Image: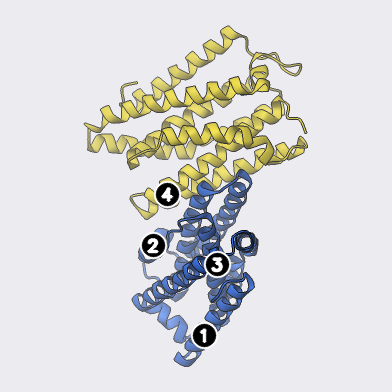
Chain colours: A blue, B yellow
Amino acid sequence: MSTGPRTQLLAILACAELSAVERLAEDATAAPSLADKVAVLSFARVQLDHYQLLADQIVADGVDPIVAMEPFSGPLAEFHAHTTPRTWEERMIKIYVGDALAADLYTELSSVLPAPLAELIRTVADDSDQREFARARVVAAVDAEPQLSGRLALWARRLVGEALSQAQRIVSDNDHLAELLTGTEESTGLDLAATAEMFTRLIQRHNERMAKVGLRP
Amino acid sequence: MSTGPRTQLLAILACAELSAVERLAEDATAAPSLADKVAVLSFARVQLDHYQLLADQIVADGVDPIVAMEPFSGPLAEFHAHTTPRTWEERMIKIYVGDALAADLYTELSSVLPAPLAELIRTVADDSDQREFARARVVAAVDAEPQLSGRLALWARRLVGEALSQAQRIVSDNDHLAELLTGTEESTGLDLAATAEMFTRLIQRHNERMAKVGLRP
C-alpha cells in the first residue's frame, strides 16, 4: 500500500479536521455559556462532515485512512500541545487565526492541484461560520477590555509561528508533499520563488486579519 | 415561553447528547491509537446527529433549545465532574455502563409516552455501535490484566450511583418530568410502584451487563 501525493495531502487535511474537532470539543467544555457551547459543537459537526469527505477520498485511493493519517497525527498533536489556550479569548483567537491561515493555505494549494481535488479542498476549507463567530467574540472581548489586546496579539504571533514551524516539518518529512509543491506529472506545482511568494501572501493576509480585529500583527 | 413535559424531556435528552459529545471528544484525545480516536469521534458524530433531531423537535414546540436545556446542563456537568475517568479502561466502562443505562431508561420511558415521541427516543437511544466498541475494549483489557476487574467493577458501581443520584435530582427539580412519570393527559404514566419496578429492572439489566464482561456487579 503506497500513498501518493494526493493521498498524503488528503490525509493531512483529514487529520487536521479530526484535530480541530478535538480542539472544538475542548472549547465547548470551556464555553462561558450554553449558547456558546452549542455553537462550538455545531462547528465540530461541520468538521466531522469534512473529515468524512476526505476519508472517503482516501478510501477511494485504496488506502486505509488510519494508515494514511498516522504520520501527521504527531506533528498536529504537537502543534496543539504547544498552543494550549488558557482563556476563552485565546481559544477564539486560535479559531480565528488558525482556521483562516489553514483556509488560505488550502486555497493557495488548490490553485496548483487538479480540478476535482482542488474543489474538495475548497469545500473543506470553508469554515466561514466558525471564523465569523470567533471574530465577533474577539472583537467583543477587546472592546470590553482593551488591555487584552497586547496579550492576544502576542498569542496570535505565537500561533502563527508554531503553525509555520509544524507545516515546514510536515512538508520536509514527507517527500510527496514537497513534490506536490514543486510539481508532479499532473500539475505544474510551485517553484521555490513561488513558494516564498505564497508564504508572503499568507502572512500578509494574516496581518490584515489581525488589523481587522484591532490587534497589532 | 413555557416548556411542557414533552419539551423538558426532549431538552434533557438533547443536553445529554451534547454532554456525551464532549466526553467522547475527551476520550478521543486520550485514545491509545489513531484508530481508537477515529472510532470514538465517529460516535461523537452520531450523538451530534441525535442532538440535532432533538433540538429540531424543541424548536417545533416553539422553544429555544438553549433555554430549554439550561436547567439540565448543571446536573449533567456535575455528573461528569464527579465521574472523570482516569484511564482508557475507565472511559470504556463509562461508555459501556452509562450509555446502556441511559438507553434502558429511555426505552422504559418511551413505553409510557405518545407514539411519535417514543419513536424519536428509541432512535436517539440507539448507540449500539459505540456500546459494542466499549464492551470489546473492556473485555480485552480485563483479559490482558485480570487484576483490573476489581477496580473497574468499583468504578462501574460509582457511575451507576452518581447517575441515579443526578437523575433523581433532575426529576425532583422539574415538575413536568415528575408529571411525565406519574401520568399526563396524553399518557397514563407510571405510578410509584411501577416507577420502583422500573428502577429495579434498570439495575437488574445493569448487573447482567456487568456479568457479561466478567465484572462483579
N-terminal of the two: label 1 or label 2?
2
Judge the density around disc 2: few (<14), some (14-19), many (≥20) Cα neighbours within 10 Å: many
Mark 3 against mark 2, which lies toward the viewer?
A: 3
The residue carrying mark 2 is: A73
Classify mark 3: helix, strand or loop.
helix
Place of residue A97 in the rendered image (x, y in percent of width and height, measured from the top left):
54, 68
Which chain hosts label 1? Answer: A
Place of residue A52 in the rendered image (x, y in percent of width and height, measured from the top left):
53, 57
Disc number at residue A200? 1
Judge the density around disc 4: few (<14), some (14-19), many (≥20) Cα neighbours within 10 Å: many
Place of residue B15 in the rendered image (x, y in percent of width and height, measured from the top left):
59, 37
Disc number at residue B78? none
The answer for how far apart the CA atoms under marks 1 and 3 are is 24 Å
N-terminal of the two: label 1 or label 3?
3
Out of A115 and A27, give the one closest to the viewer. A27
The residue carrying mark 4 is: B28
Mark 1 against mark 4, which lies toward the viewer?
A: 1
Relative height, residue A124 to residue B4 (above, below):
below
Quadrant housing the C terminus of chain A: bottom right
Which chain hosts label 3? Answer: A
